[in-house]
Image (spheres, rainbow, N blue to C red):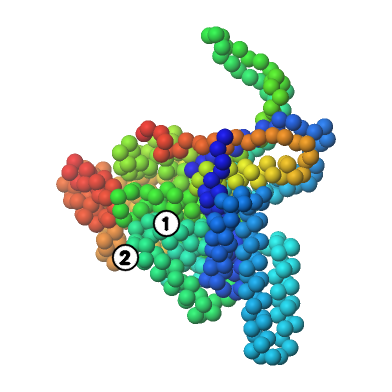
Amino acid sequence: MRYMLILRAIDVPNTPPPAELMEAIAKLGEEAGRAGALLDTAGLAPSAQGARVEVSGGKLSVTDGPFAEAKELVSYALFQVRSKEEAVEWASRFLRLHRDLWEGWEGEADVLRVFGPQDLPA
Amino acid sequence: MTERDPRRVVEAVWRIESARVIAALARMLHDVGLAEELAQDALVLALEQWPRTGVPGNPGGWLMLTAKHRALDLIRRRATYERKLEEVGRDMEIRQEAAEAELDDALDDHVGDDLLRLIFTTCHPVLPAEGRVALTLRLLCGLTTEEIARAFLVPEPTAGQRVFRAKRTLADKRVPIELPPPPELPQRLASVLEVVYLVFNEGYAATAGDDWMRPSLCEEALRLGRLLAALMPGEAEVHGLVALMELQASRIPARTGADGEPVLLLDQDRGRWDRLLVRRGLEALERARALGAFGPYCLQAAIAACHARAAAPEDTDWERVAALYRVLVHVAPSPVVELNRAVAVAMAYGPERGLEIVDGLLDERALKGYPQLPAVRGDLLDRLGRHDEARAEFGRAARLTRNARERALFLSRAGG
């Protein structure tokens, strides 16, 4: 089964991300890739470079970023795993790195199951 | 908010880490059976402790360290025993071995080599194919004996016996846990790739039983293949096999109909193909191509890529497919490949040309009992308007297959 991990930053220190963190993330990503678990991943630019399309009250509107809420999406990753716990374990490993290597950083990862052929009516 | 169930966390971490733990212990102990036993001890310990103490901060590291400590204890106990036994000054050497093992703990940067050594050992040609498959699934994929039994539709004791016998053979024949010496590498690698593809195929085209596919087995094989590609990035055939499996797996969502019945390649809704796996497959094939030499897996992947690139069946470059099959027959002669070539030739140059090739295979001993032979022949006869002969061929195919879903498919064409 597949899980989509979406990483969100809640509180980011005013310092740039430490090089050790970036290195450790790259290493863990590589490890997950070679384990055959990580299928796809990419970082996401700040919402200032994006836009939001909305439907509300029957109206379609487009607003350029940045979005008002404090939580910025940081990255996504698509995992092929055998259980939810496995996906949670991978997410925990990435968040643990943030905790240990970038003091003051706070954030969260949503671990969402991606529907597969077994879920869809033929 | 719910608490994480420690038992399920242990299981998940075990799935992720067991191969690395067993591989590291196998290096320290020079014995895969013993390595598995001690790794299992660490697992049992985790199952006992974590529900009481909570999941440790770094569960994977905990498992690895606990297992390594047990291995070190064993090495020390043996050292003491041997010292008493021999009463000679061998202990310097032994102490050094223990110290080295401890140093490994600290460094821990040859995980990749450990895994490779383990793969080459579980896929060693001294073992029969079924033993290689069972032991690899057990030690590298972390499958339980029960899961292996279910995957191969054999009773659990049979699966257990296969694993047990494979371990004993490795020990009896004193197979060293090492990377093959360069002159042996091609043959040894072929044995590894064969095991991975056997696992994949058992999942992809279940030879027996009620399910047309067992996708979880395909996933295990893909995982193994991707791991191998990361560990041996310079081997074109490894990338070729990964490409082949990713491309074939990309069709899984389209290979079954609403009632679980098989849908053949040309009838599939290509919109349901998994684009991510197609992309990964084409990328792997590109990596293989960049390395030069093209072996059987690369060729099969190149054929699968022809299908993956065609948005509709009629866009398929059948001449290229037929040409690739021609090369494949040369590189890896096999009547099954020749049969596939017949299909491609029929698509490229008409059913008569395909039928000529098929008829040349009718006396082929290896294809006696192979349901695809009458099925292909039936299809070609059908397209030539020879419907009665076609129906007879499909009836034959239905009698030969052991897969219930496939039988239904053949019977529907035999009756039509």
Residue A50 vertical placement versus B37 (above, below): above
In the image, what residue type sits under mark 1? Glu
The answer to whether residue B375 is left or right of residue B312 is: left
Q: Quadrant of residue B29?
A: bottom right
The answer to whether residue A95 is left or right of residue B26 is: right
The residue to which callout 1 is attached is B147
Q: Are marks 2 and 1 in contact (CB under 8 Å)?
A: no
Q: Nearer the viewer, mark 2 or mark 1?
A: 1
Quadrant in the picture for the C terminus of chain B: top left
In the image, what residue type sits under mark 2? Ala
Q: Position of residue A32 (x, y in %)?
A: 62, 49
Using the image, tell me which numbered label, if any, was put on residue B393.
none
At numbered mark 1, what does the secondary structure look like: helix, strand or loop? helix
The residue to which callout 2 is attached is B366
Which residue is at a point 39% across and 64% down the rendered structure image?
A: B159
Q: Residue furthest bottom?
A: B87
At numbered mark 2, what does the secondary structure look like: helix, strand or loop? helix
Which residue is at a point 71% across and 64% down the rendered structure image?
A: B105
Q: Position of residue B311 (x, y in %)?
A: 45, 35
The answer to whether residue B274 is left or right of residue B229 is: left
Disc on the earlier residue, 2 or 1:
1
